[in-house]
Image: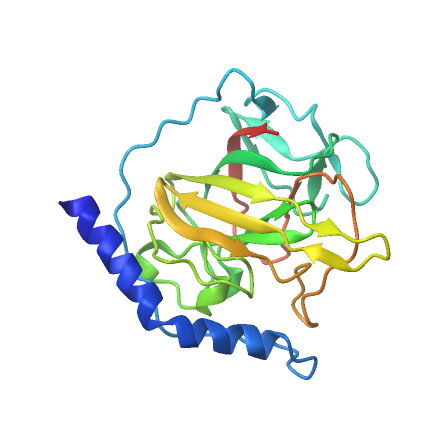
């Protein structure tokens, strides 16, 4: 009964806010809107997540097993990744920048776990900020939004397609506890002339709760320009070392099924 109520609430929220989502997309398509439509309402309802099963299946590619970052390199110069590995987790080193996989992928199922530090400080986008960049371009936001206590624009909160799509609800766990993203990602297709044939699409389960349902991605993530597509082929998965001054977040148990 509880799960049915959660689903009904999410469906009612989507139905009631179709026009709001259209407004976001129309605003983001305007080159005269440098803020990419920061939106503060409606605030997604809080959902308490259940336990999740996180072990990789037999056909998964293990990208981080808690022991080393051998599958990763620095995004800026392709040198070995310099993030700290301890106690089964990789913690962001902001001085060394983003990291990305050595391998390149197209469409996939991704499992990744992340934790906001228990002693997190800051507010808004400067509170545990990071991102999971699909194809190295399309950002799924990571941020402390536990219980909707950290106020920010809702298309920039955890579980959002950054500055594009608001999550259907907010099942985030409190700082100091591990969160889980299970993502189904479909790579975009391009015509020979470089124009877009079909957009990328993404479905996201956040701590086992559906927050993005087969949503079309509008283009490469940007904070100051319109999101547009640039033709690409197979590309690495990238994790962000955000420049805010809050304590760095950690990742663990990362695997992909192509």
Instruction: Look at the picture and state if 14 lies above or below 53.
Output: below
The colour mode here is rainbow
Instruction: Look at the picture and state if 47 lies above or below 108.
Output: below
Residue 155, horizontal then vertical, whole percent: 48, 65
Q: Does residue 130 appear to the left or right of 157 in the view shown?
A: right
Q: Residue furthest left?
A: 1
Q: 178 and 48: which one is in front?
A: 48
Residue 209, horizontal then vertical, whole percent: 34, 45
Q: Residue furthest top?
A: 58
Q: Does residue 145 appear to the left or right of 34 in the view shown?
A: left
Residue 184, horizontal then vertical, whole percent: 52, 40
Q: Specify whether residue 94 is in view.
A: yes
Instruction: Look at the picture and state if 84 lies above or below 7.
Output: above
Quadrant of image for the N terminus:
top left
Q: 223 and 98: which one is in front?
A: 223
Q: Residue furthest bottom?
A: 32
Q: Residue at x 64, y 56 (%)?
A: 243
| Image mark count | 0
Q: Residue at x 46, y 60 (%)?
A: 157
Quadrant of image for the C terminus:
top right
Residue 81, horizontal then vertical, whole percent: 72, 33
Q: Residue at x 77, y 30 (%)?
A: 80
Q: Specify whether residue 117 is in view.
A: no
Instruction: Look at the picture and state if 105 lies above or below 68.
Output: below
Q: Residue at x 48, y 57 (%)?
A: 160
């Amino acid at each position: 009964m509880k799960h049915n109520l959660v689903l009904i609430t999410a469906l009612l929220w989507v139905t009631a806010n179709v026009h709001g989502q259209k407004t976001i997309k129309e605003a983001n398509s305007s080159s005269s809107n440098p803020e990419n439509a920061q939106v503060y309402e409606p605030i997604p309802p809080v959902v308490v997540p259940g336990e999740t099963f996180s072990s990789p299946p037999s056909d998964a590619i293990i990208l981080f097993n808690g022991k080393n970052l051998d599958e990763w390199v620095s995004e800026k110069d392709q040198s070995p990744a310099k993030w700290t590995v301890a106690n089964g987790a990789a913690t962001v080193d902001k001085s060394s920048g983003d990291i990305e996989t050595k391998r390149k992928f197209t469409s996939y199922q991704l499992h990744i776990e992340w934790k906001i530090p228990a002693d997190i400080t800051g507010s808004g986008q400067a509170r545990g900020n990071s991102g999971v960049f699909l194809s190295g371009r399309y950002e799924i936001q990571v941020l402390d939004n536990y219980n909707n206590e950290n106020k920010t624009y809702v298309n920039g909160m955890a579980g959002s397609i950054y500055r594009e799509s608001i999550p259907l609800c907010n099942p985030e766990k409190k700082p100091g506890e591990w969160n889980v993203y299970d993502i189904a990602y479909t790579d975009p297709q391009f015509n020979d002339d470089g124009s877009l044939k079909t957009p990328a699409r993404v479905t996201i389960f956040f701590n086992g709760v559906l927050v993005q349902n087969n949503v079309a991605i509008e283009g490469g993530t940007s904070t100051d320009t319109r999101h547009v597509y640039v033709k690409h082929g197979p590309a690495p998965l990238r994790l962000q070392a955000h420049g805010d001054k809050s304590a760095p977040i950690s990742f663990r148990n990362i695997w992909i099924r192509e």
